[in-house]
Image: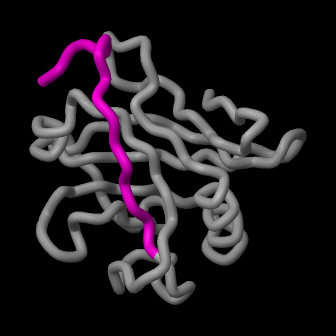
Amino acid sequence: MSVIESTGVVTASVTVPGETIARVEFLAVTVNLLRKLWDQYGPLMIHQSGGCCDGSSPMCFPAGDFLTSDQDVLLGRLDIAPAGGDPQVIDFWMSVEQFGYWSHTFLTVDVVKGRGSGFSVESPEGVRFMIRSRLMETATPFV
């Protein structure tokens, strides 16, 4: 499962077949917002489609409200539960097409002020999720 560091950052478990290195992490500010949203909506999921406009930001939905298929890649599972708490696992998905472009990147999910997607559950909070990325040098297979 995911790892919570002393800084409050949560790093995903490895879910891409054949890989040994995590691809996604949530910053502490992201974890705090997701815990609040979990309390409001129950279990959550995040999807990064790479489309234009609203679809270019990661979007958060109640788990199961956004249907995934073989056209999506599960990049990681992140447990945002406080130490000793019941698991609060969030699946992070990306469209296969977007993964083709971003297969060489490690993704950090941050929170910034501003209007996000009207469909994403953080929108009423006046913030949105934002991806920060860095190159991965050893992850295989790249698409």
The residue shown at (20%, 38%) is 102
Which percent across, then down, holds residue 116? 37, 79
**Left or right: where 53 falls relative to 86:** left
Which percent across, then down, holds residue 3? 66, 30
The residue shown at (28%, 29%) is 135
- Quadrant placement of the C terminus: top left
Is 82 part of what is drawn in magenta?
A: no
The residue segment tinted magenta is 128-143
**Left or right: where 104 falls relative to 130:** left
The residue shown at (53%, 33%) is 12
Q: Closest to the observer: 48 or 91?
A: 48
The residue shown at (64%, 67%) is 33
How many marks are shown on the rendered structure?
0
**Left or right: where 125 falls relative to 81:** left
User: Is residue 10 shown above or below 64?
Assistant: above
Tell me which corner region of the image, top left, top right, bottom left or bottom right, holds residue 65: bottom left
Q: Closest to the observer: 9 or 91?
A: 9
Tell me which corner region of the image, top left, top right, bottom left or bottom right, holds residue 83: top right
Which percent across, then down, holds residue 46? 42, 56
Q: Closest to the observer: 64 or 7?
A: 7
Which percent across, then down, holds residue 95? 20, 48
In the displayed orientation, state which residue is furthest to the right: 84
- Quadrant placement of the N terminus: top right
Is 136 part of what is drawn in magenta?
A: yes
User: Is residue 27 shown above or below 29?
Assistant: above
Tell me which corner region of the image, top left, top right, bottom left or bottom right, holds residue 57: bottom left
Q: How is the image coloured?
A: one colour
